[in-house]
Amino acid sequence: MLVDPLVSSLSVLDRSKRSEFLCDMATVGDALLEVTGAYRINYAMAGNTDPNLHAHIIPRYIAEPEAFPKALPWSYPQSEMDSMVFDYERDKPLILRLNQAINRRT
């Protein structure tokens, strides 16, 4: 999730825009909980490699392998993270359900 217009960090935003960005993050997280059956959402804003403020919103699942539920999402082996790349046609139903869930909250 990117902020619009692009800025370098959360601290650059005024109070209103900061609140809007964080509220939007929560809205997306709530939609992911509803649509994916996740039990928790991880939110991350690092900014170490990308100079623009952005957020990673990651659903977490009960069925994750035992070593990973308490670890950061990036703790998974790269081969596991690369095993399913985005495919618009395959993922279109999920995109539409997320869109509907987000729109119900806005």
Image (spheres, helix red, strand yellow):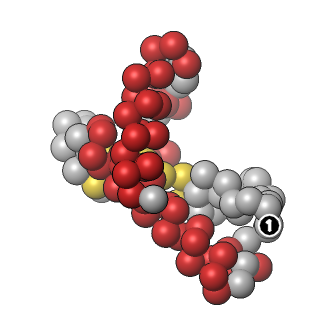
Residue located farthest toward the bottom when viewing the structure as drawn? 15
Residue 29 picture location, percent across and down: 40, 55
Q: Residue at x 62, y 77 (%)?
A: 18
The C terminus sits in image quarter: bottom left
Quarter where residue 64 is shown: top left
Q: In this view, does 80 lie to the left or right of 66?
A: right
Residue 59 picture location, percent across and down: 36, 46
Q: Circle 1 — which element?
A: loop
Question: How many marks can you see?
Answer: 1
Q: In this view, does 81 lie above or below 62?
A: above
Please state which of residues 18 and 41 is positioned toward the viewer in this rendering.
18
Q: Residue at x 51, y 13 (%)?
A: 89
Give the residue pinned by disc 1: 7
Residue located farthest toward the top when viewing the structure as drawn? 89
Residue 24 picture location, percent across and down: 52, 62
Q: Can you see residue 75?
A: no
Q: Residue at x 30, y 38 (%)?
A: 36
Please state which of residues 2 and 52 is positioned toward the viewer in this rendering.
2
Residue 79 picture location, percent across and down: 50, 24
Q: How crowded is mark 1: few (under 14 residues within 10 Å), some or many (20 or more)?
A: some
Q: Can you see residue 57?
A: yes
Q: Residue at x 39, y 57 (%)?
A: 105
Quarter where residue 52 is shown: bottom right
Residue type indicated by callout 1: Val
Please state which of residues 78 and 34 is positioned toward the viewer in this rendering.
34
Q: Is residue 84 above or below residue 96?
A: above
